Each structure stands twice: as structure tokens, then as C-alpha cells.
Amino acid sequence: MPVHTIHESRTFRLEILDKAGKADQDLLPELSDAEFIKLYESMILMRKFDEKALNLQRQGRIGTYGSLRGQEAAQAGLALVLDEQDWVVPSFREHGVMMSIGIPPHLIYAYWKGDERGNRIPDGIRCLPPAVPVGSQLIHATGLGLALRLKQEHAIAVGFAGDGATSEGDFHEALNSAGVFRSQTIFFIQNNGWAISVPFNRQTAAASIAQKAHAYGIPGIQVDGNDVLAVYAASKQAKDHVLAGKGPYLIEALTYRMGDHTTADDQSRYRSKDEVKYWEERDPILRMREFLIAKKIWSEN
């Protein structure tokens, strides 16, 4: 009986900045100095927002909060490619992206306080309220992307999730439907290594999340999620692909949450100090700062 190959695929990982902020010049995206600075400033704003949120929670002024510390590059890099006609479909850790598209920080704080006015997205901004159920928002992103295609709108929907969401049925249903109906959707998975206290290697036998996209006829790429330039480059490539009518795209941003899963968690019970230290040395903000200093477009003065 003859044997025929019915499918072959390769999954790539993109890195541009190393942990010291040195760039691979051949892969450097074509951005202006102002855009490089904007990426850095966006990450700083996200970190400061996060620090204030943690202080507010400790003071009892907001409720349980999910920190984004360590994931600023993943969110800032993706946000730079978004236009006002694009849809953002966040989970509960996309505060940075939400601010980047124009949602005032006080509304995000209100959401975490339990004030329903925090769910009121300002007019003109295409963003759904944060989804706390794990993975459900990816199906919404597929539906929005399909609507954009049927209405022939030159726009995309971006569905955000963590690695834990890819263990849910919603992830597979969303990708399967998006692939079949060529939804104008980017699935942006921030793989921060932990689904609360469950490490990635206990969630799946696969080497990456990105490779799972191929099973649904969707391109998938893994990027260094602590490298804001790599995230931007992959996001632009993905958006160009979708807007060219070629169907959906999946990006796996390999990153790390530096703090607890939420303020109701204690990460020291399941993560070693050495592991946390390893990732602190790969802080996305420090890497970008060193890159800007080397380009002589940023200084401490």
C-alpha cells in the first residue's frame, strides 16, 4: 500500500533583541526613532499602571487583580499594529493593550473595583469587556473576525489568551471555526509558562502552542514575548496576512509573569526563586532600554 504525505509544517520562533538588548540588524523592523521610543514608553506606562493597581488592591480600594508585570513587551508590540477599526477581545490581563487603544486607566481600575461603569467602553473604541472565563473570548474573536470578512471591512479582530486557555475546548473550537470560515482573526496567546500553578509542560505534550495552529490550517509562529521588536514584527506579518484575505493567524508570545497569577495567589508555593531570577534578567523593559541607549536615542539625562 503506497504511503502519501498529506501535510508537512514547520514552526518558527522569532527573536530580534537578546537579553542584553543587542539587536539582530538583519531582522530589525523598519520603525522610526519615534516609534521605537513609543514602544518603550508604552511598556513603562503599563508597568506603572500595574504598580498602582497592586497598591490599590493592598489598600482594599480594588478587588482581586491580575498583574501584567513581565508581559509588557507582548502587549506593547501587538498594540502598535492596531488601528481604530480593529477589534480587541481581551482576557483579564490585557490592561496594557486596552490603554494603548485609548481606554482611560480609571475605567480599567473601576472594572477591577467591581464598578460596572468600568465595562463601558468609550465610543469609537472597538473592544469587548475583559473575559474572566478561561478561553471563552477566543470564540468571540472568531465571530467578530468572521463578521468583518462578511462585511468586507479592512480590519481584524485580535483574541487574547494565556497558555492555560489553550487547554480548554474553546481554543480548539475557535481555531477550527476560524480556519474553516477564514475569519479575519489573530489569536494572540501569551504563554507565560504557568496556568496558575500548572507549568506548561504539564498542560501539553507539544513543544509549543504555535505548532497547534497548523492542525487547523492556520499559520502559527512563536516569538520571544519579552522582545517588543519581535512581537511587533510578528504582529505586523500576521495582520498583513489576515488583511490579504489569507485567513486567520496565531502568534504565541513566549513570556513570563513576574508576579502572582492574581493577588489571590502565592507564586512562591510553586515556583523557585532561581526561575523567577532567570526571567527577571530578561526583563522586557530593560532590554528595550539598552537597545535605545545603543542607538543613541535615549539617555538617563
Image: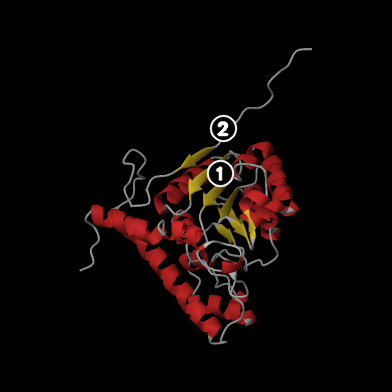
Q: Horizontal placement of 116 versus 154: left or right?
A: right
**Residue 146 shows in the view:** no
| Mark sitting earlier along the chain (1/2) | 2
Q: Position of residue 136 (x, y in %)?
A: 71, 59
Image quadrant for the N terminus?
A: top right
The image quadrant where one finds the C terminus is bottom left
Please provide percent x and percent y for residue 171: 69, 51
Which percent across, then down, holds residue 298? 25, 61
Pick the residue in front: 148 or 93.
93
Q: Nearer the viewer, residue 154 or 131?
A: 131
Q: Is residue 38 left or right of residue 113?
A: left
Amino acid carrying mark 2 in the image: Arg
Occupied quadrant, residue 180? top right
Q: Residue at x 57, y 60 (%)?
A: 88
Looking at the image, which residue is at 61% across and 67% down? 269
Regarding residue 186, the answer to whether it shows in the image is yes
Residue tagged by mark 2? 10
Q: Say which of marks 1 and 2 sits in front.
A: 2
Q: Which residue is mark 1?
A: 242
Image height check: is 57 above or below 270? below
Circle 2 sits in a helix, a strand or a loop, which is it? loop
Amino acid identity at mark 1: Val
Q: Please tell me how crowded label 1 is: few (under 14), some (14-19), or many (20+) other residues with Cα within 10 Å.
A: many
C-beta proximity under 8 Å, tags 1 and 2: no
Q: Secondary structure beneath disc 1? A: helix
Up the image or down, 165 lies above or below 206; here it is: below
